[in-house]
Amino acid sequence: MFANNWYNVVADVRNELVFQGRNKSYGAYQLRKEYNRTLAIIVLSMVGAALLALGIKYFIDNYHPAEDELANTKIDITQIDLTPPQLDKNEPPPPPPPPPPPVMETIKFVPPVIKEDANEEEPPPPQEKVSETNVGTQTQEGSGDENLQVPTDEGTGTGVIEEKAPEIFTVVQEMPEFPGGMVEMMKFIQKNIQYPASAREAGISGKCFLRFVVNEDGKISNVEILKGVPGCPECDKEAIRVVKSMPAWKPGKQNGKEVKVYFQLPINFVIK
């Protein structure tokens, strides 16, 4: 293949004879002239790549630094002493717990008994004794610290617990419902709404958004306007009147108990 004789199709002798008097810059002449050199480069490249691959494989198979380092590593197997430390005998003992609060002296309240002869009743104790005595559900002796004051309620300082107003919910497990459902409520509004004459003459229409509270008994309260009809306060007043005239609703429930619930309702004023 690499022999430079007449029988080699890419030999220089044949190339010169074939392309004698012709354009040697033509591609076929250059390909034949450089064929042997190009083929040699390709073969040498393949041999070099094969030798490089074999060298890398040999290096990977025979180089194990991690295993050598692990084999040379010494593990300390010294036992750890788990014995609890000895308490210092000179350390002072912990402080004693605080004493319990003093017990105030009280006198059990006994309801009066009406007798036939009022003169046989025992005379009541003097006013000074009554004012200095605490009334309780049972009689007990005090601890002797009568001068100590009993703390009262921290809110007002009077010791009187104020009753908390019931919470008004926005969303509950069972929402309140008009008798018969939403369809019946719309029929009620259409039947009872009265379009204000001034709004009808002026051609005013729009939607009024209301909010009200459905109480535990289903009655309506706290009716207010969230967004009224623009330019028609009479429409807002009429919407409030219709909502207040509604019958009692089915109250809302939270954990099986009737509660107060906010309800929002839009009423549309349209001239037909």
Image (spheres, rainbow, N blue to C red):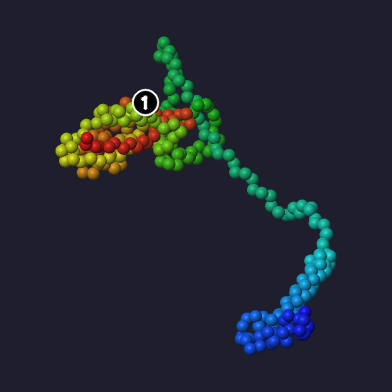
| Mark 1: amino acid | Gly
Callout count: 1
In this view, the residue in front, 26 or 182, is 26
- Is residue 104 among what the camera can see? yes
Q: Residue at x 41, y 31 (%)?
A: 252
Q: Residue furthest top?
A: 116
Nearer to us in this view, 132 or 224: 224
For the C terminus, the image quarter is: top left
Determine whether, in the image, residue 86 is placed left or right of residue 199.
right
Q: Residue at x 29, y 28 (%)?
A: 188
Q: Indicate whether 79 appears above or below 225.
A: below
Q: Tell me where residue 68 sits by quadrant.
A: bottom right
User: Circle 1: is it few (<14), some (14-19), or many (20+) Cα within 10 Å?
Assistant: few
Question: In this view, which residue lies farthest toward the bottom?
Answer: 21
Q: Residue at x 25, y 37 (%)?
A: 269
Q: Residue 254 appears at what percent x and percent y?
A: 46, 32
Residue 102: which quarter of the image? top right
Residue toward you, 63 or 136: 63
Quadrant where the N terminus is found in the figure: bottom right
Q: Is residue 217 above or below residue 2?
A: above
Of residues 193 and 82, the one drawn nearer to the viewer in this rendering: 193
Q: Is residue 160 visible?
A: no
Horizontally, residue 152 falls left or right of residue 205, namely right
* Coordinates of residue 235 in the picture (x, y in percent): 23, 37
Task: Give the residue number, with chain letter if any, for mark 1.
Answer: 180
Residue 88 image offset from top left, x and y in percent: 74, 54
Residue 120 x/y as whole percent: 43, 14
Hey, which quadrant is residue 19 in on the image? bottom right
Identity of the residue drawn at 39% across and 27% down: 250
Helix, strand or loop status at disc 1: loop
